[in-house]
Amino acid sequence: MNAASLRDRGLQLLRTALDDASADFREGQWESIEALVERRARLLLVQRTGWGKSAVYFLSTRMLRDRGAGPTLLVSPLLALMRNQIDAAVRLGVRAATVNSTNSDDWKAIEQRLRTDDIDVLVVSPERFGNETFLTQMLMPQAARVGLFVVDEAHCISDWGHDFRPDYRRIVRILERLPGNVPVCATTATANDRVVADVVSQLGSHLEVQRGPLRRESLHLQTVALPDDASKLAWLAHYLPSLKKKGGKSGIVYALTIRWTERIADWLRSRGMKAEAYHSQLDDREEREGLLLRNEIDALIATTALGMGYDKPDLGFVVHFHQPASVVHYYQQVGRAGRCISDAYGVMLSGSDDRAINDYFIEQAFPTEEEVTTILGVVEQSAQGLTMAQLEAAVNLSRTQIERVLKTLAVETPPPLAKLETRWVATLQRYDPRRRHELIERLTRIRQAEQKHMDAYGQHNGCLMEFLARALDDPTASPCGCCAYCKGQPEALRRVPENLIREAVVFLRRCDLPIEPRAQWPSDALPNYGWRGRIAVERRAEPGRALCILNDSGWGSMVRHGKKEGRFAEELVEALTDLIQRHRPHPAPEWLTCIPSLLHPDLVPDLANRVATRLGLPFVPAVRKVRAVRPQKDMENSWQRVHNLDGAFQVERRQGMAGPVLLLDDIVDSGWTLTIASALLRQEGSGPVSPFVLAASR
């Protein structure tokens, strides 16, 4: 087939997929497809969001498959993006399947479909490359047949990228196992020169780079500085309805933490809007994505779990409740809006608390040297290797910290640790901390500089789109003509009605949190109490509530102050009483007790006594602490926290304790103290136990 005929075939496929007889390739699209199909090239596409990067690799897949090539292997970082990609593949007449952590029941069927050549594109996360079962049973038997290798969001390969994922390091190893002439397509919208150079250095100097302009004419940008979280909530309530009318039927509000997504969604619902939270801990993320895609809600309040590559052509606005960590984060997320509509809005709110959240993420980005050497030490001392549960018992680190260390070491070249089935074992390779230490210091400095760059964006007195383009090393950067600065007037006003701010303050003070009952004891953590396995239903606590987050807006700082002063303010007593009355524990409590402390013996009993008086219930100090323990906040995982409390509490059987009881404490961390105290109360004959506390530590 000559070049003209090949292009005609590609154009026919594009028009069929778009159901548009007049559709044509965007500048650079056909050249990329031709390079992959005809020259079997290795390409890095750095193109703006909405340019059509997925059309390049899906059309290339279709054309390569028509020539008898094997399936495409597509590496994708997020479940939301995978679902989008599979939907896009279907529209382009490409049969796609995914192997990920949520569909393990389908793996066997997918493996069989690969064997019978019934799949055109297999979509996987980079984490799959660390799974030996996937490698040996699914990938390697097909490696010689792979027709195209695609790395979506390729900036994740780079140490310098804004969303570095250690598992992306495995991609280089996988490429080495594929045929040398397999075409490669790496794509990203957010890579400056430094990131591009790093990706090229890892995927090979023969990687061709195609770079397009990043400017988006349909996107109207605006920045708004506000003094506090209450003002931000008030701004959302006041301006989202007008953004919705001007920019489309629905949009996204990004927040930096899971708790803030829930809180913002609750606030908007209280103002009569349809809003849902979206984050990595939800089981129904796909359903919530669908609500947004079908415009059945006004806004989805999301963490970065809904980010890279998420495609909703008519998304009308993206608002950032917190300032993102970097310009590339921001461009990636705000670029969700205005793909196929003429006017969309991107507004960044910034405030005094944003820096603390971003500083925390920078500090937590890499495991410390102490964490690495601790894990290495216990694994090296074990002849048989250690499971995750055994590691939690052996070291006082959280599961997240342990997993981060294991992943970091497993992708080292060569790796000092490896996973054999369920156990982690030491290899013969020696770990060199110096190289890693230098890398972490360098990356931390870069991320701190990126944070300052975002501060500059929030204060920029010039074209906002041009600022973003220059930050991403776009040589075509120029004034956009449609941001708030270019138009000479704000797209969204900065004034917020005082009455709304007052209502937001009241809301934040009532923004309590659920305390979910624990259902399983960590293995062998309680030899003194003798409890193990599932927690019997008749020993479990009832669902409880925390009044606030410690140090957060609203009541949090008042809780910390009261703890320091040795007595909680009457205002907090009233608020906790109100919380209990609003949530009406069922069955209704007949008495009240509390968690005692040896260090501050009067603090919580005084609180409990005053709450009991307000509720008209008897206060009975039935729970006793019989030995000192280390602070629970110093315990990093469930096994350590539970073992720390083994034998620390006793409950005295008393007259009249058989009725339902309220169990009070000042601060809850993991919930294990409340769980053990509840189990002891039930064991000694109490009725159902409902825990309520002043603050959750996080």
Image (cartoon, grey):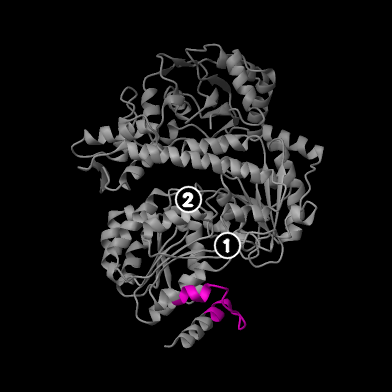
Mark 2 nearby-residue class (10 Å; few <14, some 14–19, many ≥20): many
Look at the image and tell me whether residue 448 can be seen.
Answer: yes
- Kindly state the secondary structure of the residue where label 1 is placed: loop
Mark 1: amino acid: Thr
Q: In this view, does 382 lie to the left or right of 120?
A: left
Residue 295 image-quadrant placement: bottom right
Position of residue 427 measured from the top left corner of the image (x, y, whole percent): 22, 43
Residue at image point 27% right, 64% down: 140
Q: In this view, does 324 lie above or below 376?
A: below
Q: Is residue 213 above or below residue 648?
A: below
Mark 2: amino acid: Gly
Of circles 1 and 2, the one toward us is 2
Residue 404 image-quadrant placement: top left
Say which mark, if any, is on residue 49: 1
Q: Camera-side residue: 558 or 307? A: 307
The residues colored magenta run 14-34
Direction front: furthest residue: 475
Q: In this view, does 427 lie to the left or right of 670?
A: left
Q: Camera-side residue: 282 or 313? A: 313
Q: Camera-side residue: 90 or 638? A: 90
Query: Is 221 included in the stretch rendered in magenta?
Result: no
Comes first in the chain, label 1 or label 2: 1
Label 1 to label 2, Cα distance in Å?
17 Å
Residue at image point 35% right, 30% down: 370
Q: Is residue 113 above or below residue 344?
A: below
Position of residue 408 measured from the top left corner of the image (x, y, whole percent): 35, 43
Residue at image point 53% right, 78% down: 14
Quadrant including the N terminus: bottom left
Q: In this view, does 604 lie to the left or right of 132?
A: right
Say which mark, if any, is on residue 161: 2
Look at the image and tell me whether residue 59 can be seen.
Answer: no
Mark 1 nearby-residue class (10 Å; few <14, some 14–19, many ≥20): many
